[in-house]
Image: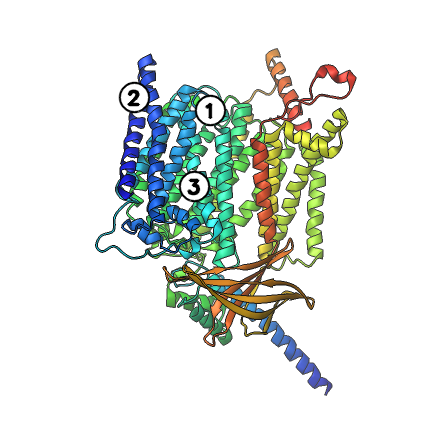
Amino acid sequence: MPAFGSYSLLLSLALSVYCFVVGALALLRPRTPRADRLGETARRAGMGIFLALSCAMLALIAACFQNDFSVAYIFHHSNRDLSPAYKFSVLWSGQEGSLLFWAWLLSAYGLVLRWRHKVDTRLVAYAGVIVAAVQVFFTLLINLAANPFAMMVGDLPADGNGLNPLLQYPEMVIHPPMLYLGYVGFTIPFAFALGALIMKYPGEKWIHITRRWTMVTWLFLSCGISLGAHWAYSVLGWGGYWGWDPVENASFMPWLTGTAFLHSVMMQEKRGMMKMWNMWLIFATFLLAVFGTFLTRSGVVSSVHAFAQSSIGPWFSTFLALIFATCMFFFVRNRKHLESENKLESLVSRESSFLFNNLVLLGACFAVLWGTLFPVLSEWVQGTKITVGPPFFNRVMTPITLFLLLLTAVGPLLAWRSTSWESVKRNFTIPAVLAIAVAVLLIALGWKPWQEMSQFYSMMAIALSVLVAATVGSEFLRGARVIAEKTGSNLLAAMVQLTRRNTRRYGGYIVHVGIVIMIIGFAGQAFNTDTEKELGQGDSMSIRGYTLVLDSYTQDDNPNYGSESAIVNVFQGGKKIDTLFPERRFFKASQQTATIVANRSTLKEDLYLVYAGKSETDRPILKAHVNPLVMWVWIGIWVLIAGTGIALVPNAAPLAVRQPSRAQAAAVEVGD
Amino acid sequence: MKRLVHCLLLAAFCALLLGADFDKRFNDLGHKMMCKCGCNQVLLECNHVGCSYSERMRDELTTALQRGDSDDLVLQAFVQKYGATVLAAPTTTGFNRVAWIMPFAALGLGIFAVVYVVRLWKARQPATITSAAAAVELDEYRQRARQETEL
């Protein structure tokens, strides 16, 4: 099986090189039937890469299921008693496997791209060649620098080292694929953008072609990041879901630039503006996706995700330099093609709100990048390494996020080209009054924003979230009223019709609502509290109105791990409301422990229990956290997913109007 | 007797205040430092079994606070013992100041540039629209803007 896998890898490299070289040659030649045939062979070779890499991937999975510890990767990341579901996740648990997985996903995206080549054959051919160039890099990497089929030297071990315990959790089976689908997926819009630039593709058609690719990719990345946050909350046991670790930052940066791109392409579509900006945004997004991999794989920065220093850093830095040089070369050569058809006319307009929104998103991306790389810079300048951890990111990112929220609230109120201040004031008054009222209510409820900065930021976040929700709500209402008036339907039905008529716009608004719900959840962090205590049987501890009584603790054992669980009864106001089972597992193969958190989640707060082990007197140590509003974060993510899903659905047909006098109008034109 | 009760009440109140202050300071300082076991986590958030540092460091923090050391002194002592990487965020002195300033400076510069460019473009545009074609174009835009914003 390893030999089959190795040959498949070699074949994938050969096909990638063929697809790139021959595809490029076919494009460079004048268009003749012979050049077209040559290009067709390249296209088919590109589809063949998917088959070759699928074979390699299946070979690695088969080796894992066969417990073939002659393969070093399987020895290091699996063991005999690992459950079947996690044997699949071995594929992305280590460096070599995850790079193979990356290459396979890219080939899968490439397959879809080449299959759907009839949209615009020439542009797709360019994009296909660029995808093939990226594929060459990854197949080279897995053949030469990080081969997943490298063999063990010396005696064959009886069992493997086992999968990292932190990865033996259900979400870990889907979180990395989601994240990788997001990372890798940005290759496609990047390839279309670069292809369009190289061939001086007229108009904005490439943006229309790549819109769904970009949105689906962005959705995958959003889901990947969210699943990672939920996994961290459920497994790491420190009571938080985001720790500003370099690996987390690496996934967040392309998300920020991708979000900026999704907003600013609307400017190009509608007004033929920001063409250069968009081009560089998608270049930056792709570069950041690759840079993220470089950051976490090279050992340049230390990470809690424990990816060891490896030899692939120089490969990635060379690749990054090559991509940047290529982008720069074609940008300088063809930049006239990207000149705007229109210019911004007013600071108070929809265009400028998009531009400022882009700026703030890029500012946030820069702050994350800066904080992640500052330890390296500090060591270079001062000779001493320092840490840039959560306190830095929280203090820098919070005001930036609040500013972004304000722009998100104001943006929908502005008209294209120019808006009068009077119109802004008129539309802004009610949402602003609502937001101020919420802030006053929070103070009345006991928040003291003047005492602590964290409480001030939390209050601002909630007030601004209300502002955004109110402006979005007023947009929906305004549109729905018009529809209800013209069709005679009720307001709710009119809102559904309105959304169906312009899925992109109103789906986008729903995404904004999802984001503000998440931000309300983040705001709860200012009121997190925790306590820790050794508990004997029948002992109790209290935290913010909850009384926790240890009923007993129990042990269990299976071939893969042994576990200890505490059985904790939860009382509130003297009444038993729940029983929680925080657990600690000891994995035999890797000789490592992992936490399984017990969580009682409500809209108001989470009661989060961690079994932190046993004390010297053999009594369980329990750590309890009360984390307000965390459920809002997860609800916000679902709303975001729903909004993106709606935005991906094509618009419904125009509505037929009810009034006979208007019958000739045939349809109601709504939205953009 | 009355005076004694007052004194006891005052002492109890002070003890409560001190206790609250102690917990808050412990929490604040514990979140300003990293655990040195290599887990890359904030001191009070490092929770893995067998950590050879977190418990010891928390005890040291408790001792320093009980001794009455100021926050600066506590942090300084930890830096001396464990190195600069024990601090979870860069200090606001020397070159480290750049870490804090740079993100906001970049953002401010970007906003300034956008405002400047828009004003420049606006200033270069003709004050009035004279041609009929331009007027028609403007009407189209008005119509579109109405569709997009007013419905």
Image height of A289 relative to A85, above or below: above
Q: Locate the N terminus of chain A and report the quarter of the image it occupies.
A: top left
Mark 1 and mark 2: span between their CA atoms? Answer: 22 Å
**Residue neighbourhood size for the residue with mark 2, other residues' Cα within 10 Å, grouped as few (<14), some (14–19), many (≥20):** some
Q: Which residue is mark 3?
A: A180
Residues behind callouts 3 and 1 on a single chain: yes
Image position, residue A326 (x, y; %): 34, 30
Q: Secondary structure at mark 3?
A: helix
**Residue neighbourhood size for the residue with mark 3, other residues' Cα within 10 Å, grouped as few (<14), some (14–19), many (≥20):** many
Image position, residue A557 (x, y; %): 45, 64
Query: Would you identify the image quadrant in which residue A332 lies?
Result: top left
Mark 3 and mark 2: span between their CA atoms? Answer: 31 Å
Asked if residue A636 lies left or right of residue A203, the reply is right
Asked if residue B135 lies left or right of residue A264, the reply is right
Mark 3 and mark 1: span between their CA atoms? Answer: 24 Å
Image position, residue A367 (x, y; %): 46, 46
**Residue neighbourhood size for the residue with mark 1, other residues' Cα within 10 Å, grouped as few (<14), some (14–19), many (≥20):** some
Query: Which numbered disc, 3 or 1, marks the residue that appears first in the sequence?
Result: 3
Amino acid type at circle 2 is Leu
Q: Which residue is mark 1?
A: A206
The residue depicted at 55 percent of the width and 70 percent of the height is: A552
Q: Which residue is mark 2?
A: A25
Query: Which numbered disc, 1 or 2, marks the residue that appears first in the sequence?
Result: 2
Q: Secondary structure at mark 2?
A: helix
Does residue A407 appear in this view? no
Q: Nearer the viewer, residue A199 or B13?
A: A199
